[in-house]
Amino acid sequence: MTLRQLLPVFCLMLPLAGHASVADQIAALEKSKTQANWAPALPDLGLPQTRIPAARTPHMMTLTDGREVNLNNYAVVVFMQRGCQYSAKFDPKLKQWSDEVGLKVYPYTLDGYGDTAFPVALIPRKRGANEPLAGEIMTFFGNGLPIATPTTFLVNVAALRPDDTIAAYPLYQGDTDMATFSQRVALMIEADIDHLPSDTLGPVPTSQGVTQQ
């Protein structure tokens, strides 16, 4: 049975809000990123690791309604593949833009490899032998969104919901320009501040530059 066949079975079981396991993972990465010389976790090779705590500089964004937000409270999750031609086009633009505005990016790879923009990527893992899809995939695509690359989500990393989940909003599926992407980020931040459910915000923008799974 393919991923596409399995997905509808779970669409009614899981909301888009992230599971506690994903929230814990991102929270742990966030804690590490407050320290100097941070890099994504690598296998324990027995090497000493010395990190010096360092405060993060606020990165402010002015929303369309005039409100200002600190982008340190948010992050982008991107699902990508080294073998996806559209990830190869989109990821370098996302990396450059995120560096400029100060918005963190957590790359998840669907083929097990990073790319030139994100050489070290997180790999979705099954939490048990009976889990048909990795938890991170179900977390973000469990509302019926097609599994495809590149796909981006906005997550609030500053606070968990009362049920220990993270607020996650679909941003875009496929390659796009950064002006369009930035506008979508601002819109989803407004939705998060106003506590609007993601399923009330209309269809997720999609381009033709996308690789379906």
Image: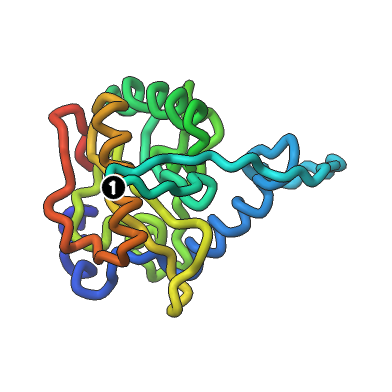
Residue labelled with disc 1: 65
Classify residue 153 as left or right of residue 97.
left
Residue 78 in the image: state x and y as whole percent.
Answer: 38, 41
Task: Determine the residue positioned at 50% across, 63% down.
Answer: 23
Q: Nearer the viewer, residue 186 or 16?
A: 186
Question: Splitting the image into 4 quarters, where does residue 185 fall?
Answer: top left
Residue 133 visible here: no
Q: Nearer the viewer, residue 3 or 138?
A: 138
Q: Is residue 8 above or below residue 173?
A: below
Q: Is residue 157 above or below residue 159?
A: above
Residue 59 in the image: state x and y as whole percent.
Answer: 53, 39
Residue 154 in the image: state x and y as whole percent.
Answer: 37, 49
Which amino acid is tagged 1?
Asp
Q: Few, some or many C-alpha atoms within 10 Å of disc 1 (few <14, some 14-19, many ≥20)?
A: few
Q: Secondary structure at mark 1?
A: loop
Which quadrant of the rendered structure holds the N terminus? bottom left
Classify residue 105 as left or right of residue 48.
left
Question: Splitting the image into 4 quarters, where does residue 88 fall?
Answer: top left
Q: How is the image coloured?
A: rainbow
Q: Nearer the viewer, residue 1 or 17?
A: 17
Task: Determine the residue positioned at 17% across, 47% down.
Answer: 204
Task: Determine the residue positioned at 35% across, 58% down.
Answer: 168
